[in-house]
Image (cartoon, helix red, strand yellow):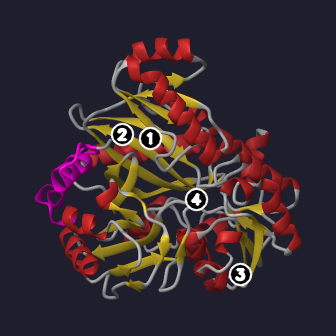
Amino acid sequence: MSAAADRASRPGTGPIRRVLIANRGEIALRIIRTCQALGIETVLAASEADRDSVPARRADRTICIGPAHPSESYLRVEAIVAAAIGTGAQAVHPGYGFLSEKAKLARACEEAGLIFIGPTPEQLESAGDKLAARRCAVAADVPVAPGGAVRGAEDARSLAAQIGYPLLVKAVGGGGGRGMKLVDSASDLEGGIELAAAEAGAAFGDARLYLERFVAHGRHVEVQLLGDGKRVVHLGDRDCSIQRRFQKLIEEAPAPALAQPLRTQMHEAACRLGARLGYRGLGTVEFLLDVSRGEFFFLEMNARIQVEHPVTEAVTGLDLVAEQIAVAEGRGLRFDQKDVTISGHAIECRINAEDPARDFRPAPGRVTVAEFPEGEGLRVDTHIEPGASVPPFYDSLIAKLIAHGADRDQALARLREALARTRIGGIATNVAMHCAVLECAEFAAGGVDTAFLPSFLAQQFHAAPAA
């Protein structure tokens, strides 16, 4: 057995009693909720800007790890490890974003005798690094889109000529649409690379880039995996094609209007990749489905919990954070593939603090009103309440509204009604945009591609489409 495989299958130190949460916002609160249900104490590692946040008040303890800017707090490995040791935590949960896919944090935790609730350092290097993940996908017989690493200006021009335009410049260590730029022609290549590198460096501390073919009419379909280092199962799929500037805004499970043979092929391809990695923990294999050709390509693997995990929880009945913790404790998978069932349909809207009248620019500020609906099949994941501050330093996500129904029509009807009853004051949000999209007949029919939302918004706001 290789060192990586041995580490992946090695049991943890038994039940986790205290977890340090190295994140903020709604995902921090989400982790706190599951830990409290499991009887696990929580310590929140918060920046100065988040010391008075709702998650900080809900955690059993909060420790400040630095100033507001992520580079001085949430991206400081040494500060997070020191906070965990200093508070007597046994484990670190990184959430999503920030350092969640950085092998450096996982390795530092391991060296300090802490449990990292996530994949092994080696798996993060293979899956969290987008280029390494492409190589693993090829080895697992998973189709990949034409592309490759950016090794310099001349090399980039040569590779771009082989791929053809338009193409995407993507961050090797990125996610969430950051460090990703669409390049339409050779004259735009250098500028796109510079912008992507700067954005990736600021967001992830990693400015490495690669190029990949852009599919104009593609659907973003992803498969949720869970592994324990020995076995891997899939938990169904999601469609995340409603995107603006490569950031997902509406997600649903299962993916609508997808032929079963193709769905099965995607599930099998994702599981082959997970098995090759000997994967441990939660991971999402993202595919781009070329609508015109009926072919799918591997995009990347997110080696962490996803923002959109609630729709998978809704249709499977699983608590994915609890499953992460169980694997981290060394208990292994608690079910087989045959035990995973998909019930009904779920749709999620990401509510962001952003101003539609100003090209959806982030709109930080103080929340004066925060009213969310309750009802059958509804779930709200949020960290805001009246009086809460939305800082300008972080992602603009403030809430997720999720509706589950017996079928897609029922889930859609419930979500429409829930959005109509949502009230947020003091800051601008994209709630009205979600209402408009859900009323659109094309979206309601199911199966739109990633070009849908930019075109729809251009019509709604009389502006040029934003990729």
Specify the amino acid type for callout 2: Leu
The residue where tag 4 is placed is: 96
Image side of residue 210 versus residue 353, left or right: right
Image side of residue 129 versus residue 167, left or right: right
The residue where tag 3 is placed is: 40
Q: CA distance from mark 2 to mark 1?
A: 13 Å
Whether the magenta-drawn stretch holds residue 455 is answered as: yes
Specify the amino acid type for callout 4: Tyr
Secondary element type, mark 2: strand
The residue where tag 1 is placed is: 269
Depth check, mark 3 against mark 4: the one in front is: 4
The residue where tag 2 is placed is: 288
Quadrant showing the N terminus:
top right
Q: CA distance from mark 4 to mark 1?
A: 24 Å
The one nearer the camera, 45 or 12, is 45
Disc 3 packing (10 Å; few <14; some 14–19; many ≥20)? some
Residue 274 versus residue 157 in the image, above or below: below
Specify the amino acid type for callout 3: Ile
Secondary element type, mark 4: loop
In primary-sequence order, the first of circles 4 and 1 is: 4
